[in-house]
Image (cartoon, rainbow, N blue to C red):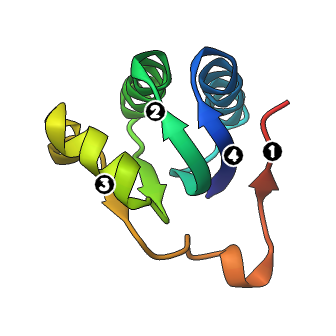
Amino acid sequence: MHIVEAKGILGTEQGQAILLEVQQAMADHADDVWIDCQEVTFIDSMGLGCLIQAFKHVRSCSHTLHLCRINSQLKTVLELTCADSVFPSSRSAPPAADRGEGWIRPR
């Protein structure tokens, strides 16, 4: 499992950083990827596009990208764009969060 922590405004810069981390995780033969969205304050269309690209990349490697600890704003954006049916998501923490394993902050 590989966990990426998203923070602040999830736009082009943050989205591209997350996408690069996800691509590297797959190159390093990671299993499923979890994106912790607890500290995301806003997401725009470019950020959503990067999440979709990351999702497609992980899926092409026969794994799953999960969004976790999503807030109400992110949940609304996912619902309005029908992306909520694509991304496995939850308001709870990723499985390893309690042990502090695998946390990666996008550069």
Look at label 2 and name its amino acid. Answer: Val
Residue drawn at x 43%, y 60% is 71
Above or below, 69 relative to 41: below
**Label whose residue precedes the other's in the sequence (1 or 3):** 3
Label 4 secondary element: strand
2 relative to 42 in the view: left or right:
right
> Is mark 2 in CB contact (under 8 Å) with mark 4?
no
> Callout 4 environment at 10 Å: few (<14), some (14 to 19), or many (20+)?
some
> Which residue in the protein does label 2 denote?
58
Above or below, 26 relative to 89: above
Give the Cα separation between the discs numbered 2 and 4: 21 Å
> Which residue in the protein does label 4 denote?
7
Q: 70 or 101, which lies in front?
A: 70
> Is mark 2 in CB contact (under 8 Å) with mark 3?
no
> Which residue in the protein does label 3 denote?
88
Label 3 secondary element: loop
> Callout 1 environment at 10 Å: few (<14), some (14 to 19), or many (20+)?
some
Above or below, 53 relative to 1: above
